Image (cartoon, grey):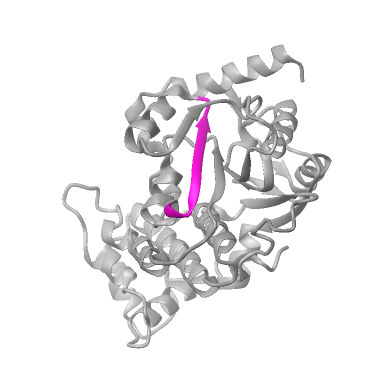
Amino acid sequence: MDTRSIELENQRLKASWDCFPPEHLARYLGIEEQDQRINTHSILTRALLVDTLWPGKFDALIDEELRFGVVMTWLLQELRSGTSRNELWDELNTATPGGRIPGLVRQTADWLQMDACPLPDYLSDALLYTESDLPAWYLFEPALNTFAGIWKSQICGLSAEPIEVLEVACGSGNDYKAIHEFGLTTFINYSGFDICWKNIHNARDRFPEAGFFEASILNSGLPDDSFDYVFLHDVLGHLSPEGFQVAVSEIMRITRVEAWLHCFNVADIDQHEIHPFQTYFRNRLSIPRVIETVERSGAEVRVVPISGMLERKLGYVPDYTASSGTFIARKTPVQASSPGTTLPAAVSQLG
C-alpha cells in the first residue's frame, strides 16, 4: 500500500467520524451493549490487564464479571424490546422455569440472593430501580457500577510493576474511563490515539491526566516497540483489505510484548467478506486470514472466539457477541522478564 493510498484511506476514516458533533462522539461508543461496564470485549481487556499485573490472582472474579456483563446485556435487550421490569421480576421469581428467562439469568438471580454470595444483588437493583431522567429501558447506574467498586476494593493496596499500554482508535476515551474508574490506571502508563481530532479533544477534556494524541492506525509515526501492550476494539473490520494488512503490521511494529485485537465480526471462513459502507467498511473477517496476517508480522497468535468462551464458561451467549472474537498476538521473541505470559482462566481454554 503506497503513501498516497494510505493517505486516501486516512481521509476516508477521518470523514466517517468528523461528520459527527463532539457531544455525539463522547457518548456513542459507551452506551447500551457497548457500555464498557458490560461489554464483553471491554471486560476482557481489563481482565488481560489484571492478569498481566497479577497473574492468576483474580480468575474467579473475572469469571463473575463476565457473567455480570452477559446477564446485564440480556436484561438491557429485554427492556429495550418493550418488556417491563415488573414482568421480568415476576417471571424471575416464579418457581416454574422456562419462559423468556434464560437458565443463566435465573441461576444468577438465585445465586445473588444467597447469604453466601459475596456480590451485591445487581440484578434486583437493575430490575427494581429506575432513574426518572432516563428512558425506562436504561439500566440503573449503581447496578452498572457494581464491578467498578469491587475491583477498586480488590486491587487497592496491591503493588505491581507498571506497564506501558496503548489503545489504538481510542475514541473519546470510553474504555479509558472504565479502566480509570476500576482503579487500574494506578498500575499502567496509558496512552491512546485516534484519527478523529474531535475524539481526542473530548478525551483530553475528560481525562487531562492521560496521554491522548491524534494519529492513524495505518501510519502512527511511533517508534518500534513503543508500548509493552497494545489493544484495540473493532477497528480492523472497518478497513479496506489493503488497509487491514498495513494496520496489523503497524500495530505489531509498535508493540513490544503483546497486542490484543478485539474484532466484532469474525468467522471461520476462507477469506474476508468485504462490505464497503459509505466512507469506510463493515467487513466480516476470516479467522484464518487474521492469524496468517498477524503471524507474518512476527507474532504467535491465540484466538478467543467470544461465543465459544461464553458458552463454555456460562452456557449462554447474547446475540450481540455471537460473532465477535479476540486475537492475542505475542511478539516473538519477548524478553524473559516480560509479564503477561499466561491468560486468565476465564479465557485460557481457546477455540
The percent coordinates of residue 93 (x first, y second) are 31, 79
Residue 268 on the magenta span: no
Residue 208 falls in image quadrant: top left
Residue that extends furthest to the top in the rendered view of this protein: 4
**Relative side of 248 to 200, left or right:** right
- The relative height of residue 144 versus residue 240 in the rendered view (above or below) is below
Tell me how many marks there are: 0
- The relative height of residue 57 versus residue 36 in the rendered view (above or below) is below
Q: Looking at the image, which residue is at 59% across and 71% down?
A: 56
Quadrant that contains the N terminus: top right
**Relative side of 195 to 88, left or right:** right
The percent coordinates of residue 252 (x first, y second) are 71, 39
Q: Looking at the image, which residue is at 24% across and 53% down?
A: 136
**Relative side of 195 to 268, left or right:** left
- Front residue (pair 15, 79): 15
Q: Looking at the image, which residue is at 68% across and 18% down?
A: 6
Q: Looking at the image, which residue is at 51% across and 68% down?
A: 62
The percent coordinates of residue 97 (x first, y second) are 43, 81
- Front residue (pair 25, 139): 25
Quadrant that contains the C terminus: bottom right
- Front residue (pair 261, 206): 206
The percent coordinates of residue 44 (x first, y second) are 55, 57
- Front residue (pair 127, 147): 147
Residue 308 falls in image quadrant: bottom right
Which secondary structure dominates the residues rendered in magenta? strand
Residue that extends furthest to the left in the rendered view of this protein: 132
Residue segment shown in magenta? 186-195
Question: Would you say residue 36 is visible in this rendering?
Answer: no
Question: Would you say residue 83 is visible in this rendering?
Answer: yes
